[in-house]
Structure formats: C-alpha cells, structure tokens
Image (tube, rainbow, N blue to C red):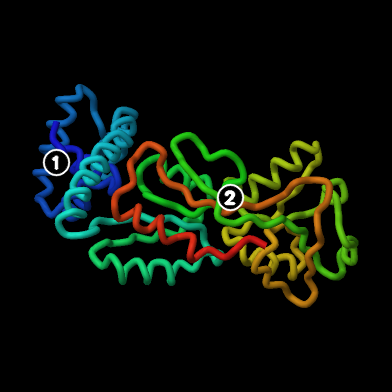
Amino acid sequence: MELRHLEYFVAVAEELSFTRASHRLRVVQSGVSTVIRSLERELGAPLFDRTTRDVALTDAGRALLREARTTLDAAQAARDAVREVVAGVRGTINLGTMTGLTLVDLPGLLGRYHAEHPEVTIRLRAATSGTSGLAKSLVDGELDVAFLALNDFPPAGVTARELFVAPMVLVVRDDHPLAGRRNVRLTDLAHLEFVDTPPGWGNRVLVDRAFATAGIERRVTVEVAHLGVVPDYVHHGLGVALVPDFDLVLADDVHPIAVSGVDLRWTLSLATSATRRPSAALRALLAMVDQYVRPSP
C-alpha cells in the first residue's frame, strides 16, 4: 500500500464520484479505478458500493477513511517539518466555524496570517450543522481546527480550549406575560413556545440539558440555523428564546431577562484533533488566535 493509493481512495470517498476524483487528482478515471481495485484486493474487502449512478462507502471503506486521513496527515506533517526548515511555512489549513460568529475577528486574523505566511492556503467552512457537526468533522479529518460552542468536556478525539464565556438570557417581547421581570427561573418557562437553533448546536445542547435535568417540558416550535437572528423571530411573536448575552441586536420591543437558579453559560472554544499532530502552518495560526478574540464580559 502506497500513500498514492490512500490519496486516490480519500479523493473518491470525499467526492463520491470516480469522475470528480479523477478531475481533482488530475489523472485519468481509469487510473483511479485501477488503484481502488488494487487497494480492495490488497485489503480483501470492497471499499465502495458502485452503481451506474451512485458511489457510496462500504463499512470497510468508512473504517479505512479515518485511518487514511490520519496517515496522509502524518506524511504531510513530515513534509511540512522539512519545508519549514528549508523554505518557511507552507501547506493547507481547513478551518471550521459556526455561522454568524462575531466574537472572533476572522477577517483580521486570516488577513494577518496570510500576510505573514502567504504560502499557506486556508479553506474556511461555515458549518450550519453547529458544534456537533464541526466536532465530527475534526474527528473525521475533514477539518484541522474549528471554533465551536463546547459547554462540556470535548468529545473523544477532540482537544479544546476555552476562548469566551457568556451567560444565557431569556429574550421576550414587550407584550409577553414575563416582560418587565428582572429575572426568571426555569420553572417560569414551562410549556412556553421557544425559538432556538437546531439540535446539536452548543447553545441548544446546553439549554435542552438544563430543562431535562430540572424535569421541565420545553417546546421548541421554530428552529433557526443562525444564532444571531433568533431574537428577530421573537420580535415577530414566534416565541421566547434563550441566547448568549453578547452582541444582542434586539428590536425596540424585545428585551433580555436574567435567568436565575441554574448555571447557563455559553462557551466558545477553539478545537483541534486530539490524534493528529498539528502542522507547522496550523501551529502558527493557533499562536495568533487569542489576539483576535473579544474578552469575556
């Protein structure tokens, strides 16, 4: 088995198309097919289910994909170590972030990084799948680093450090029965209609867990894949919401209320793989991040 075999396999696995993989690799399609068949014979298992229209990973293919990415990352790290000595920092960084992230000055961070390391390519991906999707992409090797909302210990295979913490507050419209209160408890919120982000987002996990622990039913009637616009839906009478108390852009008839009796704190973290050694390019980026993060309140 050669690194080239694994590169071909990963390309087909990510593209789920032999044609697209051949274009990505800049080789003829028959060459890709030959390598994959050779790899399947060597491993004694089919790696893809092929039909005339679709290509899908088999269980064996999924098992190989993570190991193949780890092996290719290790090989790239070895190349980077030599290149760093010979010609400076080079390579590619796959960076994931939540949609609408404003706590980190990403344009400023990436602009400075590019100025200092012009030979590094950064691929930025804003994930609508929230923290759970970003963490999975880190574990699977699709991302090298991610900004995500971890409110607990990081999942297996992920290393994270805290960057920013903010309390959660309830936002309600002026005509809501709770309007005018200085603070509320979770018991005051039973059976209300909520606007929230989808399951798997860090703030959603935190709030769902708090209600479940308290044994209180919560109804989420509207799900929005952008935390920053949740208060807009409150403004239009679609429910109340629990959101982190930072950068709140509220209409004149929407106000925040403190939540007492429960520890609801939203945390922004910087996460990397716990199993892959960061490249020289990634280490250089990690060293800059703190200068571009807003201080916690």
Q: Secondary structure at mark 2?
A: loop
The residue where tag 1 is placed is: 4
Identity of the amino acid at label 2?
Trp
**Nearer to me, 227 or 246:** 246
Identity of the amino acid at label 1?
Arg
- Find the residue positioned furthest to the bottom: 252
**Nearer to me, 72 or 225:** 72
- Find the residue positioned furthest to the front: 85
Left or right position of 153 against 59 = right
Q: Earlier in the sequence, mark 1 or mark 2?
A: 1
Q: Quadrant of the N terminus?
A: top left
Percent position (x, y) of residue 107?
A: 43, 71
Left or right position of 7 against 162 = left
Q: Is residue 41 above or below residue 167?
A: above
Label annotation for residue 207? none
Q: Secondary structure at mark 1?
A: helix
**Nearer to me, 190 or 282:** 282
Percent position (x, y) of residue 224?
A: 61, 59
For label 2, count other residues whose C-alpha is less than 10 Å away and answer few (under 14), some (14-19) or many (20+): many
The residue where tag 2 is placed is: 201
| Residue at x-position 57% and y-position 54% | 268
**Nearer to me, 62 or 187:** 187
Q: Is residue 221 above or below residue 13?
A: below
Left or right position of 179 against 105 = right
| Residue at x-position 67% and y-position 46% | 206
For label 1, count other residues whose C-alpha is less than 10 Å away and answer few (under 14), some (14-19) or many (20+): few
Q: Is residue 211 above or below residue 287?
A: above
Percent position (x, y) of residue 186?
A: 82, 47
| Residue at x-position 52% and y-position 45% | 132
